[in-house]
Structures are given as structure tokens and as C-alpha cells.
Image (cartoon, rainbow, N blue to C red):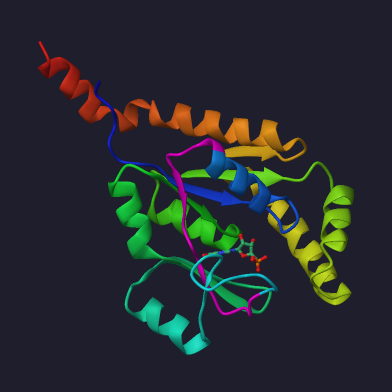
Amino acid sequence: MVTNREGLLVVLSGPSGAGKDTVLRRLLEVNPNVTLSISATTRPPREGEEHGKDYYFLSKAEFVQLISKNGMLEHAQYCDNYYGTPRGPVEEGIQRGHDVILEIEVQGGEQIRKKNPEAVSIFILPPSMKVLSHRLHKRGTESEEIVEKRLATARKEIEQADKYDYVVINDDLEDCVRDICDILSAEKKRTTRSGKLIEEVLKNE
Ligand code: 5GP
């Protein structure tokens, strides 16, 4: 069987509390072709977070050095910290045929859309602001001040959702994950990604 060999570059954004982490964890379980890019950040680790697994936790100097070596696919400042996507592993994953997911905020999403027009961008919405506020307070890992700041940021981010290719609501986890799998599956069949495939079919007489 002939298949398209390159994987997809996928941007997944959504406000803090939209449930991106849970959605991603489930997506990785149900879709073996998906891999997740591990970001670099200057924010301190939360309890239970591990260097090299959840994030690469870097100093600001280390972060800036990576940018200057063209080692970041995109980077942005978010809530007083820097976040960025290390370039190498993403490009290697795509070459190997994996769909590589960047779980990033909207400024980074915009950079990727500009520099990589072939990328697929998906925005995860919470069912409502009320549900979002409830989820953020329930998490209890941050102070009230930070939660309020994240809610204000969330509102601004949701206003950017219409710049994305797709919008999915995370109300029911399984529905949301199925929606994302459907999007990835349809994107692979786009004619713009099927040039080689059409050639190979024609050659195979
Ligand atoms: P958190 O501090 O809650 O882990 O992440 C805060 C925000 O930073 C989230 O919206 C998350 O998607 C975003 N983020 C995580 N990694 C990256 C990255 O590599 N680049 C960009 N631009 N945003 C990121």
C-alpha cells in the first residue's frame, strides 16, 4: 500500500484549564502515530513535573542561547515566562512519519502558521467561561492572583480561536479526542499532501 510518508505538524492551543493535557494524554493512548513535542520553558516546575518529560526547564540565559542558535521553531512570552519549541525533535519526528503535536499558546501558534503554512492548527475550547473558571480554581496548584491572571489571558486567547483551522470543544473527553483524530485523518488525505502518492499510483502499472 502506498502512503504519504511525512507526518503532520500540528498546533494545538487552548486556554489554561481547557483540558489540553488530558486531551493530549488520551490522544497519545488512542493514536500511536501521534507524538508530542516537549517544550522548553523558564517557568519553575510544578509539583510532580519532570525535566525532559513535561518540559525542559531552562534558565533564561539557556533559553536565549537556544533561540540565538536557531534551535527554536517558535517561542513566546506567556504570564512572565518564556516558552518555546525545540526545533530538532519536531523535524525528525515529521520526517519519520509521525504527527507531531505542539501544545502551545496563541502567539506561538501564529508564528508557526506564518512560517509553516502546511501546519494544521486546532483550538480547544472549554464549554463556557464558567466551566473554565471552575476547572482553574479546582486545580489548586496556583495562587488566586495567578488564576485570575490566567482567566484574563484565557479570554484574550479564546478571542483568537477563529484564526485556527479547526475549533473543538472539550466537554466530553472521548468526543473531543475523536474529533482531533478525525481532523488528522482528513488532513492526511488533502490533495496538497498527496502529490507523491498520486505519482506512485500512476507508476504502479
Ligand atoms: P503551563 O505553564 O500551564 O504549562 O503552560 C502555559 C501556556 O504555555 C500554555 O498555554 C501552553 O500551551 C503554552 N506553552 C507550552 N509550551 C509552549 C511552547 O513551546 N511554545 C509556546 N508558544 N507556548 C507554549
Considering the image in quadrants, where does the N terminus appear? top left
Considering the image in quadrants, where does the C terminus appear? top left
Can you give x and y, in whole percent of width and height, for residue 184 in the image? 48, 34
Q: Does the magenta stretch include residue 35?
A: yes
Can you give x and y, in whole percent of width and height, for residue 86 in the image? 41, 67
- Please, what is the dominant secondary structure of the magenta stretch? loop
Q: Is residue 165 visible?
A: no
Quick check: 19 above or below 178? below
Q: Residue furthest top?
A: 205
Can you give x and y, in whole percent of width and height, for residue 136 in the image? 82, 60
Q: In which quarter of the image is ligand 1?
A: bottom right
Side (left or right) of 190 relative to 144 = left
* Residue at the image point whose x is 53% and y is 73% from the top: 51
Task: Say which of 174 and 107 sits in front.
Answer: 174
Can you give x and y, in whole percent of width and height, for residue 170 in the image? 72, 40
Q: Is residue 91 magenta?
A: no
Looking at the rendered structure, the number of numbered marks drawn on it comes to 0
* Residue at the image point whose x is 65% and y is 47% from the top: 161
Task: Say which of 25 and 136 sits in front.
Answer: 25
* Residue at the image point whose x is 40% and y is 47% from the top: 117
> In terms of image quadrants, where is residue 140?
bottom right
Side (left or right) of 72 relative to 26 = left
* Residue at the image point whose x is 46% and y is 81% from the top: 63
Quick check: 3 above or below 159? above
Q: Can residue 125 be seen in this view?
A: yes
Quick check: 108 above or below 18? below
Side (left or right) of 18 relative to 68 = right
Side (left or right) of 107 relative to 139 = left
> In terms of image quadrants, where is residue 141?
bottom right
The magenta-colored residue range is: 30-45
